[in-house]
Amino acid sequence: MFTGLIREMAEVISLKNSFLTLKAKYKAKIGDSIAVNGACLTVVRVSSDTFAVELSPETQSILAMENYRNRVHIEPAMMMGDRFEGHIVQGHVDCLGTIKSINKNGNSTDFIISLPSEYSKYIIPKGSITIDGVSLTVNEVLKDAFRLTIIPHTIKNTLFESYKIGSKVNLETDMFARYIYNMFKPSDSKEDLTWDKVDRIMATY
């Protein structure tokens, strides 16, 4: 389990034969679970100043591998007793998003990110979303897209600084949104379930 709060930006040393080698201040141990750009990976090698995680071909096929070079976000798995911030993140990437627009808005920047239509139902206004492992709040839900408002501190200290229109990013939708949606959707119903309908159903309990 993770929180979506990036511990640091690690330097990518190499990606060879499915092994991603990183250099970071964090001292990893064999077997550690670490979210790298939001994907939960296992540490399989360590040296004095680097560690390596292994990515299977299947894992690489679902990740935005263009962002696994130069620098990456890392977050070690939570430990019992850790302070909980951000939101509950599993490190299981649902799909890729595509950055459609980047617009300055006063002292912040709006990013509009599109995603496959089958995942749009899990995006909730003011709900949580994980972008390449970064826990963020959805400001607006659009048709097959959503808008984020990012403050300068986040842009400066994450990969958001390097994103461009057309960039691909790893998306993990909110775990509770997925559970609630599937709990309240009748298996034999052809009617689309909306969050307004979920609210009405929950209000009857």
Image (spheres, grey):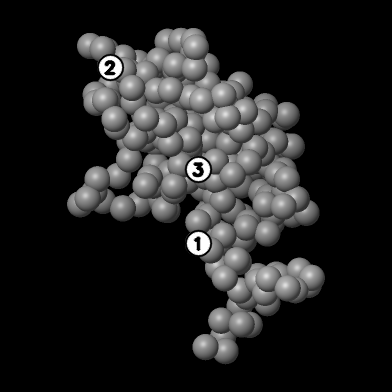
Residue picked out by circle 1: 176
The answer to whether the residues at label 1 and label 3 have Cβ atoms under 8 Å apart is no
Q: Where is residue 173 shown, x and y percent of the image? A: 56, 51
Amino acid identity at mark 2? Val
Task: Give the residue at x 56% y 81%.
Answer: 202
Secondary structure category for the residue under label 2: strand
**Mark earlier in primary sequence (2, 1):** 2
Amino acid identity at mark 3? His
Q: Quadrant of residue 62?
A: top right
Task: Give the residue at x 57% y 24%.
Answer: 57
The answer to whether the residues at label 2 and label 1 have Cβ atoms under 8 Å apart is no
Secondary structure category for the residue under label 3: loop
Residue farthest to the front? 188
Residue picked out by circle 3: 92
| CA distance separating discs 2 and 1 | 35 Å
Secondary structure category for the residue under label 1: helix
Amino acid identity at mark 1? Phe
| CA distance separating discs 3 and 2 | 24 Å
**Mark earlier in primary sequence (1, 3):** 3
Q: Quadrant of residue 165?
A: top right
Residue 194 disc label: none
Q: Where is residue 167 shown, x and y percent of the image? A: 67, 28
Residue picked out by circle 2: 46
| CA distance separating discs 1 and 3 | 14 Å
